[in-house]
Amino acid sequence: MQHKTNIVDIAKISGFSITTVSRVLNGKADRYRISKKTQEKIKAVANEMDYVPNAFARNLRTGYSKTIALIVPSLKNPFFAEMASFINLEARKYDYITLIGDSDDDANIEKEEIIQLTSRNIDGMIIVPCGSEWDHLLKKQSEGLPIVCVDRYFEELDLSFVSSNNYDGAYEASRYLIEQGHRKIACIQGVRYSTPNIQRVKGFEDAMADFGITSYAVTGDSFSEQNGYLETKLLLQQAKRPTAIFAFSNTIAMGCLKALKEEKVKIPENISLITFDDNPYLNYIEPPLTCISQPVEDICKIAVKN
């Protein structure tokens, strides 16, 4: 087995005591008035010997693992993949590492992921909860684990959360379509019981009511391409097709685009399409889609700082 360099090895090579080496490598040199020259020599030897601090020993000593967990519903979804990237980047600025779990939008898998991740002595958790259950989250919080929900959350619970104003975003998107002359509008929603979806439906319906529009449709049940594809196919089979579709996520919008292309329905000549969420790939679609952009990077920064 390959020998891993430790402070005893560094002490032997540098000629200093194990205590002195330990204090230098653990950032306590100034407290014990260890000279700069001694610090530099010890650090130089440590670098030459490819010394890597023992994280487990540090955890026992400090009580902190410098590790946070992140659980998202699906890393295949560009929105959550982007979120994971920003959270990982932001955590690194504070010398933390991120353990990422994918619940596959399944509450049972989410619970198992939480058990597995918390067994690794994490310092906190950021989660996009996928179900309507929350007892397992409250239990972990009561045990002292800091938890922050992002995007999806539970309004009635004392759980910290960071999210966009989904109601206003949906209302503005709907009003925009109405102001463009549309009177037969359909929205394709995501997970029905999730807070963002509930608020987006409310924003959409309130906009319809405020402009006196009663002929509209709310359909769908998942933030997935397949949902967007199937629901668009069904909408196009109606005797009176909608003149505009509001997709509640960029993944739903991708499914819409596929269905519209197959049916040879042109955007915006035959039908208008607007989506909630932005993503760089939307810039390469012809014509570019109008979208409600969420400040994902800001959401992630706030979640990590909490």
Image (cartoon, grey):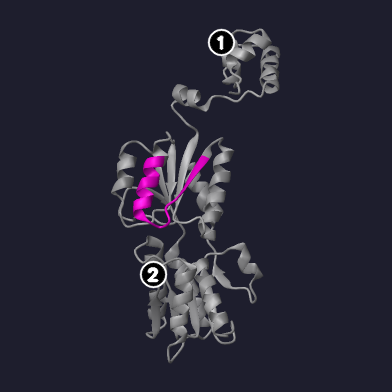
Identity, as a three-letter code, of the amino acid under mark 1:
Thr
The type of residue carrying mark 2 is Asp
Q: Nearer the viewer, residue 209 or 101?
A: 101
Q: Residue at x 58, y 45 (%)?
A: 89
The magenta-colored residue range is: 98-116
Report the residue marked by disc 1.
Answer: 19
Q: Residue at x 51, y 82 (%)?
A: 179
Residue found 50% across the figure and 33% down from its top? 66
Q: Is residue 108 visible?
A: yes
Image: 10 above or below 161 = above
Q: Residue furthest bottom?
A: 239
Residue 20 highlighted magenta (yes or no): no
Binning the other alpha carbons within 10 Å of mark 1 as few (below 14), some (14 to 19) or many (20 upward) gives few
Q: Quadrant of residue 119?
A: top left
Q: Is residue 185 visible?
A: no
On the image, numbered disc 2 is attached to which residue? 221
* Dot 2: element: loop
Across and down, in percent, residue 237 comes to 45, 87
Tag 1, which secondary structure? Answer: helix
Q: CA distance from mark 2 to mark 1?
A: 61 Å
**In the image, is residue 114 part of the stretch drawn in magenta?**
yes
The image position of residue 175, as x and y in percent, is 48, 77
